[in-house]
Image (spheres, coloured by chain):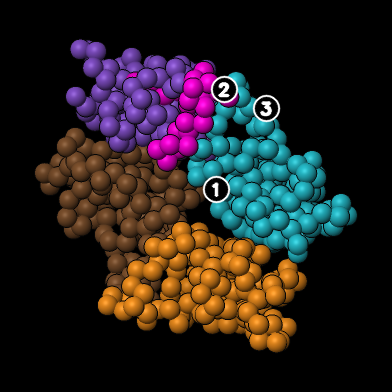
Chain colours: A purple, B brown, C cyan, D orange
Amino acid sequence: MNITLEQAESVIAAAKKQATELKTKMNIAVVDSGSNLIAFVHMDGGWIGSVDISVKKAKTAAWFQMDTKALTPLVQPGQPLFNIEHSNGGLITFPGGVILKNSSGEIIGAVGVSGSTVEDDHTVAEAGAGAVK
Amino acid sequence: MNITLEQAESVIAAAKKQATELKTKMNIAVVDSGSNLIAFVHMDGGWIGSVDISVKKAKTAAWFQMDTKALTPLVQPGQPLFNIEHSNGGLITFPGGVILKNSSGEIIGAVGVSGSTVEDDHTVAEAGAGAVK
Amino acid sequence: MNITLEQAESVIAAAKKQATELKTKMNIAVVDSGSNLIAFVHMDGGWIGSVDISVKKAKTAAWFQMDTKALTPLVQPGQPLFNIEHSNGGLITFPGGVILKNSSGEIIGAVGVSGSTVEDDHTVAEAGAGAVK
Amino acid sequence: MNITLEQAESVIAAAKKQATELKTKMNIAVVDSGSNLIAFVHMDGGWIGSVDISVKKAKTAAWFQMDTKALTPLVQPGQPLFNIEHSNGGLITFPGGVILKNSSGEIIGAVGVSGSTVEDDHTVAEAGAGAVK
């Protein structure tokens, strides 16, 4: 199962709405279950350096079928996955990447958000994920 | 001058409409005048390999301030810019990348389309470019 | 707003002067607000490995609209942006990248300096930034 | 023997002067004999996509100790070095990269110019090379 563009656009619309409520300027990327880019928006005035980070958060979540915040403790020095970011052309393992599931609970993709604090980024990504039906 | 997200979304909507009329499944990327990704969609069932091609077409047009089809004859064997594609992390120099101008004639970004014949790709990109106000 | 070459050359002249006073041999890079390289010098005898570091410091500052030393505490193990350096083709997040503002306070680019201690690097970058009018 | 920054700056000054006379907006890069970047300028309004091309032209010339235009016929389809551009992280093999020699005839680096026709690019690079003493 893979996300449709219609679903991806609903994720982006919900994430944009949440980003605006938080007065943030986000980059929002949606990938399918194979980590391919399906939809993306850069909100006016957002950090340009966060374009790539939002895409890498989404890809990281989809590649490992878990939110990036689940990876964060595992990639610290001395922990099992320390420096895993060197794989796959670059991962981002801090919060803001969230997996997307359909109503049957199957993973159909992931959303990555970057442009504010990692807490805001994760909140906006969760809002996007909540829009999938 | 740089494209706004609202303008980029109008480009994508117009390009998607044209793509549907042509019964094609396109990847459509919009970048700002500095070749940064502003908006992107992958239409359901389109070639995954064309995600990157659409982005590179848009970036190529913006970097050199001309449609990619203007570059095509110049990059052929024996022509002045043969193998220019090895610069900037990879260019795409066949048709489908079109510059975006505002009502004052200023370049504000570019759109790149990939997923069908290069003629269809260019037609869809042109339709997108026509939506900028 | 973007930096002009004349402004970039004044940044480099001021940074070189400061570098010489500190008896250091610096690499000094100036980028525009979109992180594109505008001017660069490598002082005789400076570390060759610092060419790329100076460019990446300047790009990092411009992409995130802040001095690289503001990022340093945030990218440490256990901190929110740990390993953000894997994005954008490689960031440098220790001191030596400084944003450049015009007289209206608008960000017009950034300067990156590498070749000595990070304290010296930052001092030289600051001297360069002070030359923008 | 390697180029000094003072020599590199004289190359850039002479190239800029020639570029202005030709009413072109060039990117001009100087590398040492090991293809390390020594000095660079982007003239206001020049193509951003040519930043990287100018650097790659200079590096290509220095790596192979010949002007890039000497490589052009050798990289055509069916010729001995076809697609050599895939090496070294990307070469540019059309005109505009010129080797720099000191008064003893030793190669001390190269200059790469990009931003106009390849004929103009080569003319400006030659003007730069003529400034080395």
Q: Residue at x 85, y 57 (%)?
A: C20
Q: Distance between the residues labelled 1 and 2?
A: 37 Å
Residue shown at 48%/73% (left/top)?
D116
Q: Between residues A86 and C97, which one lies in front from this camera angle?
A: A86
In the rendered view, tell whether residue C9 sits above or below residue A117.
below
Q: Which residue is drawn at 27% across and 55% down?
A: B96
Q: Distance between the residues labelled 2 and 3?
A: 19 Å
Task: Write down the residue under mark 1.
Answer: C34
Amino acid bearing label 2 = Gly
Above or below D120: residue B13? above
Residue C92, quarter of the rendered image: top right
**Residue at the disc numbered 3:** C73
Residue type beneath disc 1: Gly
**Residue C16, x across and y down, in percent:** 79, 58
Q: What stretch is highlighted in magenta?
A: A73-99
Image: D81 above or below A114: below
Kindly identify which chain the residue marked by label 1 belongs to.
C
For label 2, the SS is loop
Out of C108 and B94, give the one closest to the viewer.
B94
Q: Position of residue D41 (x, y in %)?
A: 62, 64
Disc with the residue nearer the chain's start (1 vs 3)? 1
Circles 1 and 2, Cβ within 8 Å, touching? The answer is: no
A90 within the magenta span: yes
Mark 1 vs mark 3, foreground winner is 3
Mark 1: few/some/many CA within 10 Å (<14, 14-19, 20+) = some
Report the chain holding disc 2: A
Q: Which chain carries label 3?
A: C
Q: Name the residue under label 2.
A: A78
Determine the secondary structure under disc 3.
helix
Nearer to us: label 2 or label 3: 2
The answer to whether residue C52 shows anywhere in this view is: yes
